[in-house]
């Protein structure tokens, strides 16, 4: 049940937004083993003149950049899965948007199972319920 929020230094069309969301859903499912039916994604655009890298607007640098923040349940992914995810997200975003500034970030937040949930129940509750003690 991940939640993803990506900010991209561009204006983006509806078609590009759908491509980004589809690509992130696919990578999140295939690499991090998350259920697509529970994956929530927001795509936001920030004008490149308002996004600064190394003290200069990214729009003046001939590149784009992005920030992806994803929340997952703590302990559900390995370091190798996370490393592969970061690499594949960058490669995919570069394929969609062209040359990216190296200061394009993916932040994976591991949230404790008792600190979040969906449909009115925490992940911890689901884990305990699934144990059938």
Image (cartoon, helix red, strand yellow):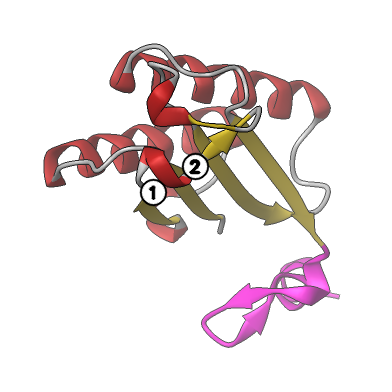
Asked if residue 47 is among those painted magenta in the image, a careful observer would answer no
104 w.r.t. 117: above or below: above
Which label was assigned to residue 51?
A: 2
> Total marks drawn?
2
Q: For this view, does 85 lie left or right of residue 36? A: right
Residue 74 position, x and y percent, is 81, 53
Q: Which residues are magenta?
A: 112-133
The image quarter containing residue 85 is top right
Q: Earlier in the sequence, mark 2 or mark 1?
A: 1
52 vs 4, nearest the viewer: 52
Tell me the SS state at disc 1: loop
Q: For this view, does 118 lie left or right of residue 100? A: right
Residue 32 position, x and y percent, is 61, 35
Which label was assigned to residue 46?
A: 1
Q: Residue at x 81, y 75 (%)?
A: 114
Say whether residue 128 is visible. Answer: no
Q: Residue at x 22, y 43 (%)?
A: 18
Asked whether disc 2 touches disc 1, contact meaning CB atoms under 8 Å apart, the reply is yes
Asked if residue 127 is among those painted magenta in the image, a careful observer would answer yes
68 vs 55, nearest the viewer: 55
In the current view of this chain or complex, which residue is farthest to the bottom? 120
34 w.r.t. 127: above or below: above
Residue 29 position, x and y percent, is 48, 37
Q: For this view, does 67 lie left or right of residue 112? A: left
The image quarter containing residue 67 is top right
Say whether residue 133 is visible. Answer: yes
Which label was assigned to residue 127?
A: none
Q: Residue at x 78, y 75 (%)?
A: 115
45 w.r.t. 90: above or below: below
Q: Residue at x 75, y 78 (%)?
A: 125
């Amino acid at each position: 049940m991940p939640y993803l929020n990506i900010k991209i230094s561009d204006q983006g069309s509806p078609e590009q937004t759908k491509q980004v969301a589809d690509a992130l859903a696919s990578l999140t499912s295939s690499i991090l083993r998350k259920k697509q039916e529970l994956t929530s994604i927001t795509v936001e655009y920030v004008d490149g003149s308002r996004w600064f890298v190394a003290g200069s607007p990214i729009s003046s640098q001939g590149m784009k950049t992005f920030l992806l923040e994803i929340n997952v349940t703590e302990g559900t992914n390995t370091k190798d899965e996370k490393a592969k995810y970061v690499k594949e997200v960058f490669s995919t975003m570069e394929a969609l948007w062209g040359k990216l500034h190296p200061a394009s970030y993916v932040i994976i937040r591991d949230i404790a199972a008792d600190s979040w949930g969906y449909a009115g129940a925490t992940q911890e509750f689901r884990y305990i319920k699934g144990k059938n003690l």
